[in-house]
Image (spheres, rainbow, N blue to C red):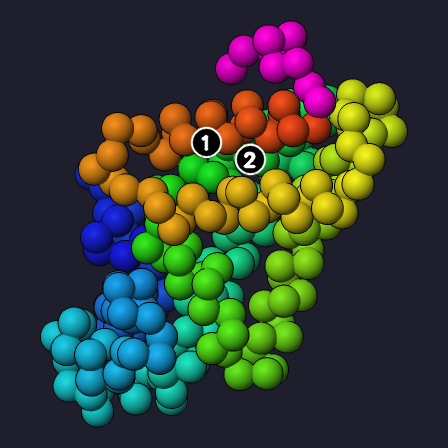
Amino acid sequence: MGTAEETPGEEQPWGEVSPDAARRLLVAAVEAFAERGYHATTTRDIAGRAGMSPAALYIHYKTKEELLHRISRIGHDKALTILRTAADGEGGPAERLAAAVRSFVGWHAAHHMTARVVQYELDALGEGHRTEIVALRRKSDAAVRDIINDGVRTGEFDVPDVPGTTLAVLSLCIDVARWFNAAGHRTPDEVGALYADLVLRMVGVRTRELPQK
């Protein structure tokens, strides 16, 4: 979603944020936080990247932490939507789990800069904002756990520890943001497909027997 992550034909990054000056500051903050980390980034750094004065930043965001919260909230809302859409989709547990992993990993790869900030700067949030984001993360956890529980109930999955497996699946998906390189030899869709296959093997599904998509 940051400018470094834009692709031809993609809608404007952070288009849900207005006015445009606030959007530009958010894009600049994502880039700065991803490159330097939240604590090493100053409001002057962010304003400079956006082509504005530091004073202009405070018109739209009272603090640097408010900027991080806005980024984190939008990112976690997106993550939850991705996982719930897959969990509520058609097909059996294996198909829904594969869809969840493909889309979740694909987003973390395609928007790896944003995802690094969203997923790994949680501790920089103030207590109230952190509590809000943790609640969203728990909902995402529940969406994946529900799919795995369905697979266990139907006998499709062999999973002795559902909570532990849910954590492992989400951790595997999220970590893509740490290493994905847009100049690498795999596209976000290809990484998503690979991870979907790996996760299905993790829960004991013979992937060759699944319908091909």
Report the residue at 42% width, 67% height from top. Answer: 71
> Circle 2 sits on which residue?
101
Question: Magenta residues?
Answer: 204-213
Please identify the residue farthest to the top as the structure is shown: 209
* Dot 1 and dot 2 residues touching (CB under 8 Å): yes
| Mark 1 to mark 2 CA distance (whole Å) | 7 Å
Residue 42, given in percent of the width and then of the height, sits at 26, 83
**Secondary element type, mark 1:** helix
Q: Which corner quadrant of the image does residue 98 belong to?
A: top right
Q: Is residue 10 left or right of residue 17?
A: left
Q: Is residue 129 left or right of residue 149?
A: left
Asked whether residue 186 is in view, the answer is yes
85 or 94, nearer to the observer: 94
Whether 90 is drawn above or below 17: the answer is above
* Badge 1 or badge 2: first in the primary sequence: 2
Residue 58, given in percent of the width and then of the height, sits at 30, 89
The amino acid type found where label 2 is placed reads Val
Report the residue at 56% width, 27% height from top. Answer: 198
Instruction: Tell me the number on the disc at residue 192.
Output: 1
